[in-house]
Amino acid sequence: MGPLDLRGTVTLLERALSSDRMSGLDWYRLSGDLGRTPTAVLLNRDWRALFERCLLEMAVSLDLEYALREEALARLAGHPQSGPVIAAIAQEALSDPTVQVYNDTTSLLMYCDHPDAGDVLLDALKAPTNNDALRAALIGMTSVVRSSTDRDVTGTAAQLALSYLRDEERPLRVRRQAANLLRALDLPGKHRLAVGLHAHDLRYAATILLEGRALERRRLQAMAAGIREALLGAGGSHVDPVLDRMIRTALEDSDDAARGAASRVLMLVPQRPVIATELARELAASRQGSDWLGVQECLEVLVSMARADDMETTLELLVEPGTPPEVAMLAGIVLGNAQEDDAARARARHQRVYERALAVINDPMGGLSPTSTFALSPLAASTWDANGAGTGPMPVRGRCAEDVRQVLRGLVYVLGMHGRVDLIDQLAAHTRHVRDRAPASGSRDRSTAVTFTLPVESAAHVAEGICRWWLELPGHVQPLGPGTIALAGPSQGT
């Protein structure tokens, strides 16, 4: 490594603080230069601007561009001057319901030693903004407790993780990460706890607690063997041991941080298409067998490796009303990350996604999975029943609004990552129309079950916030890729 190019560093810093485009390599170089200068003097507002911009860019980046920004953020987070800014940004993000990506922000806390890091995560665990923020806080806390000697912190984290693991209202991704946090704590009575989890039909959680995996060992071995066979069938004479270890980590490890790191290595290797296609086959088999745990495990890996040619099952999972909301959201992220070169196929897929989003906005109860239907709160039970009988506004449990948010987030993500701001703009206009004409109270139509309005978090309100996030992306941050169809904002028309 040669001497520091001060002039080049200043040029990159000025570009990062401007509205000029930055490449992943630009961020990589800038973070490396700042990392070699621990005495570099930057104002807190400049540190904040660097983190906020790079985080925003990473949220809409793919492949190598994503990996370079991820590494750059880790370097910036490790700078001795950036800790207070990271803690403040993480706290703000975890309390903001409009944030689209929480985990990228909270992961920065792993690289700084600021004393507020643990408190920020504990506060988010005690009063989570939504399930995505909760899962991000659980992942961050898992890293914190591995090195923490504060018994108050670890004790509180254990109690909260156990409560979320047992909370049937929480989605699988949250409960899975809660189990992994308990595993990281290495509790003295974990075997007794595992027996109790088995008794409550939480076998996957017990397996995570004791062995660090969610699926049965035989199933994982078969999946890994299928990938190895596909790699050999594609012309290889053997599977590299390091590649094999990355595949097994991505498939098996219950720690989302470790699995994510392995998946991001696999997204950059030349064998990626073969691995992704084999995972897509496994996904289709899991869906056919209604194995939602298997579906989710496959999708988690495909987030980093998606191929447009393998997206039929993923698309169906996204647009089918019977798909659990958290699975639909994950399917949307996978489909959005699969950059499409076939313009005609892309337009057809985008139209299905758009129509599904309209259906959810127009009829949230009819458009969601049956597990979300009539999820009434105790307050609602006295005035409304499961048949839709009742008067006045229909109070719906927060889970229903959360389910709407997850489904719409996945749908709009596809349109945003593929540059379809024209369709997002149309969705935003439709949500305003729905909100403006919504009746003052809930109503019941026996032929179509129940329609309802939520005083604050109506489906239209939720959709409008998600659309606004994408529409307000600065021009120098909007996604660029081979599958991009339109990048002009709504004011320019597309």
Image: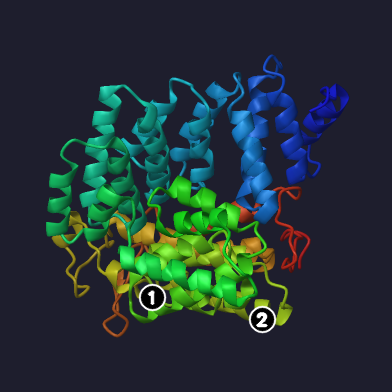
Mark 2: which secondary structure? Answer: helix
The answer to whether the residue labelled 2 contacts the one labelled 1, judged by CB atoms less than 8 Å apart, is no
Q: Is residue 478 left or right of residue 360?
A: right
Q: Position of residue 14 (x, y in %)?
A: 81, 30
* Residue 22 image-quadrant placement: top right
2 vs 1, front mark = 1
Q: Is residue 131 left or right of residue 34?
A: left
Camera-side residue: 308 or 217?
A: 217
* Label annotation for residue 286: 1
Could you tell which of marks 2 and 1 lies nearer the N-terminus? 1
Whether residue 429 appears in this view of the structure is no
Residue holding disc 2:
345
Image position of 436 with respect to 291: above or below: above
Mark 2 and mark 1: span between their CA atoms? 25 Å
The amino acid marked with disc number 1 is: Ser
Instruction: Indicate the quadrant containing the N terminus: top left, top right, bottom left or bottom right.
Output: top right
* Residue 241 image-quadrant placement: bottom right
Categorize mark 1 by other alpha carbons within 10 Å: few (<14), some (14-19), many (20+): some
Categorize mark 2 by other alpha carbons within 10 Å: few (<14), some (14-19), many (20+): few
The residue furthest right is 7
Camera-side residue: 320 or 304?
A: 304
Whether residue 445 appears in this view of the structure is yes
The amino acid marked with disc number 2 is: Arg
Mark 1: which secondary structure? Answer: helix
